[in-house]
Every structure is written in structure tokens, then in C-alpha cells.
């Protein structure tokens, strides 16, 4: 696998490498600063913890895949913005302890589109890692995901990586509608499937990285969360 994030200014001539370019057009003005401050001040505690832990797990996977320190750091911070679109979803839906209805499910699914729109509105380029993660972290390798039903290597590498990290944390963490699961059980579900989550949903290379990084992923997830540390490189 080629680099997951490229620090080059131009798109390379090898699309199969799934490089994600940090566009030079994403100059950082006051809008990004205000976005960061809003995240720190207004993010729901559970959502904040989820985003940070997804970033940590993603970093572990990236390092296992051979990413260097700078690339892994960019991936960490980009993945910590994956659910920023949930700011646009009514809290009553996100915190509902009962099963969501069809309309509510459709509303929640729109957080991917909202997230990309929020980040672009804050000055991010369309190929910025955080935008690609926000838009693509619910796409599935078999094409059954959302919002666009993209499949396989057509999903940006950083989004394929974020998808695994997102599901890992979602299964391990307690939610209003589910109990927390131990690391071993979560690994079994992701790698073997449980009827709802299936290994076919994920890039096999990312699953191999998860299995290889099992101990470091568990240790990173177990670390307490303090503050969100956004990095300008991801935007």
C-alpha cells in the first residue's frame, strides 16, 4: 500500500495509490480557529471522547501500515473530526435510548454530508484528509455503505482506515442504546462478523493491520481523554 496521506502539493499520477493530498488552498483563517473553539466548547462529552479515540485507533493502524510519524499524526487528527457533521443532527436523535425510526436513521446518515460541508465551509479543500474522512467513514468495502455507496479501492484510504477505527470505538464504548464490549469481543466481531458487522465491510488490509496492532489499539483506547488537539495539517 502506498502512503495514506501525501504532503505533496499536487495530485500524483498514480490514483491506485489512494494518496490523499493536503491541498495548499486550505489556508487557515479565523473561520477554522472559531471552528476549533466551538468543538472544544460545545461538543457533547460522549461525542468528543468518541472522536478522539477514533483518532488514536486510526493512528495505531496507520503506524502498523508503515506510516511515518508525521503521516500518522495527520491521520489521527483528521479522524478526530470524522463525526463533526453530528453538530447538524438534533441531539434528541443522537441521545435517543430506543431504536431509531426510518426517518431518524436517514437523518443520522446525513451527518457524513453535513460534516464535509462544515469542513469545506471552514476553509478545507475537497481533498483535505478531514473532509475525506467525514464524508467516507461509513462507506463499506463491499459497496453497501453510505452516503454514496462507493466500494473497494474507490474509497479513499484514509476513509477505509477510519471506518475500522470508528466501528472499533463504537463497539467498545457505552452508548444510551448499548453496553460497552471488551476488546476481545470487539476484535471477534470486526474480524469474524456478528450478523450486523461483517468483515466484508472493511478493507482486508485494514483488518490485517487491526489484528496486528491489537495490543497497541487496546492500550491506546484505554488511555483517558483530555482535550481535542486539532492540527492545521489535516484541513
Image: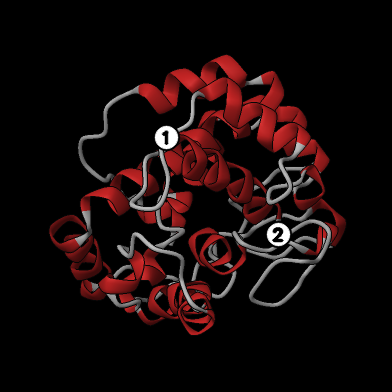
Q: Residue at x 24, y 68 (%)?
A: 35
In the rendering, which numbered label is found on residue 136?
A: none
Q: Which residue is mark 2?
A: 156
Mark 2 closeness class: few <14, some 14–19, many ≥20 residues within 10 Å: many
Q: Position of residue 226 (x, y in %)?
A: 20, 35
Distance of mark 2 from mark 1, alpha carbons? 29 Å
Look at the picture and state if 214 lies above or below 139.
Answer: above
Color scheme of the displayed model: secondary structure
Marks 2 & 1, CB-CB < 8 Å contact: no
Residue at the outermost top position: 215
Residue position marked by numbered label 1 in the rendering? 180
Q: Nearer the viewer, residue 118 or 170?
A: 170
Residue at 44% x, 72% y: name it: 115
**Front-most of residues 193 and 29:** 193
Q: Position of residue 175 (x, y in %)?
A: 36, 48
**Does residue 41 lie above or below 49 as drawn?**
below
Quadrant into which the C terminus falls: bottom left
Residue at the front extreme, as displayed: 98
Is 220 positioned to the left or the right of 160 in the image?
A: left
- Percent across and percent down for residue 173 are 40, 38
Total marks placed = 2
Amino acid at each position: 500500500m502506498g502512503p495514506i496521506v501525501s504532503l505533496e502539493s499536487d495530485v500524483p499520477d498514480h490514483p491506485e495509490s489512494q494518496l490523499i493530498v493536503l491541498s495548499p488552498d486550505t489556508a487557515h483563517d479565523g473561520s477554522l480557529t472559531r471552528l476549533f473553539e466551538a468543538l472544544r466548547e460545545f461538543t457533547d462529552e460522549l461525542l468528543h471522547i468518541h472522536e478522539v479515540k477514533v483518532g488514536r485507533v486510526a493512528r495505531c493502524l496507520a503506524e502498523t501500515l508503515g506510516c511515518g510519524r508525521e503521516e500518522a499524526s495527520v491521520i489521527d487528527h483528521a479522524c478526530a473530526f470524522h463525526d463533526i457533521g453530528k453538530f447538524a443532527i438534533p441531539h434528541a436523535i443522537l441521545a435517543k435510548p430506543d431504536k431509531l425510526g426510518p426517518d431518524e436513521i436517514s437523518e443520522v446518515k446525513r451527518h457524513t454530508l453535513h460534516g464535509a460541508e462544515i469542513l469545506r465551509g471552514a476553509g478545507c479543500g475537497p481533498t483535505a484528509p478531514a473532509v475525506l474522512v467525514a464524508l467516507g467513514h461509513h462507506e463499506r468495502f463491499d459497496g453497501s455503505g453510505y452516503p454514496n455507496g462507493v466500494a473497494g479501492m474507490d474509497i479513499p484510504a484514509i476513509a477505509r482506515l477510519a471506518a475500522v477505527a470508528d466501528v472499533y470505538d463504537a463497539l467498545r464504548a457505552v452508548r444510551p442504546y448499548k453496553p460497552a464490549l471488551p476488546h476481545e469481543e470487539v476484535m471477534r466481531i470486526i474480524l469474524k462478523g456478528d450478523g450486523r458487522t461483517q468483515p466484508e465491510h472493511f478493507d482486508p488490509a485494514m483488518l490485517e493491520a487491526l489484528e496486528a496492532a491489537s495490543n497497541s489499539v487496546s492500550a491506546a483506547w484505554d488511555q483517558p481523554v483530555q482535550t481535542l488537539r486539532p492540527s492545521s495539517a489535516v484541513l
